[in-house]
Image (cartoon, helix red, strand yellow):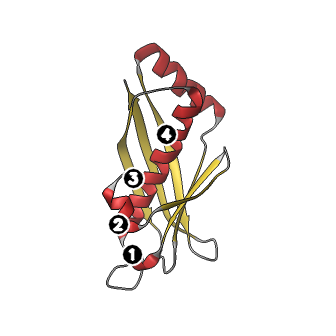
Amino acid sequence: TVPLAKAAEVQVDRYTGEQLVLSAPLNCNINDKGTAFGGSLYNISVMAGWGMTSLICRELGLQGDIVVAKGEIEYLSPLKGRLVATVDKPPAAQIEHFLASYVARGKASITQEVSIPDESGKCCVRFIGKYAIVN
């Protein structure tokens, strides 16, 4: 439902219960140098973290608005192919703390780490986002 995601042609490749993978074609996210546009890399990273947070909330039965509260990105090298953002579910202890905070205060935050590799598996982008759910 996010217009920017539609324009970038972001799609869900898979969710295993432990890992979420989103992707988008380079041709919709290209810059003047023929590599992935930095804003598109940030966009898909934020969406991957938001998606994992949303899935965790659904699995825990939590309802509320999920927002990105903070995001830090490192552009490590140019990406010349498809944008593929991967986020692993945080450790169980972090999820338990997230749930306890929500139950106690009606709001909680959780950190998500997203990576975008190139075709050879070399990490081109590293993103760390803090996501919050509020009632």
Which sits in the foreground, 119 or 93? 119
Instruction: Quadrant for the C terminus, please.
Output: top left
Residue 29 image offset from top left, x and y in percent: 38, 73
Secondary element at tag 2? helix
The label shown at residue 72 is: 3
Disc 1: which residue: 28
Q: Are marks 2 and 1 in contact (CB under 8 Å)?
A: yes
Q: Is residue 65 left or right of residue 100?
A: left
- Residue positioned most to the top: 104
In the rendered structure, find residue 7 and report the number of the disc placed on it: 2
User: Which residue is painted at 46% across and 21% down in the image?
Assistant: 102
x%, y% of residue 126? 49, 59
- Residue 54 is marked as 4
Front in this rendered view, residue 22 or 112: 22
In the displayed structure, 13 sits above or below 106; it is below
Disc 2 residue type (three-letter)? Ala
CA distance for labels 4 and 1 = 25 Å
**Up-down relation of residue 8 to residue 131 (above or below):** below
Counting residues from the N terminus, which is met first, the one under dot 2 or under dot 3? Answer: 2
Circle nearer the viewer, 3 or 4: 4
Amino acid identity at mark 4:
Ser
- Toward the viewer: 42 or 14? 14
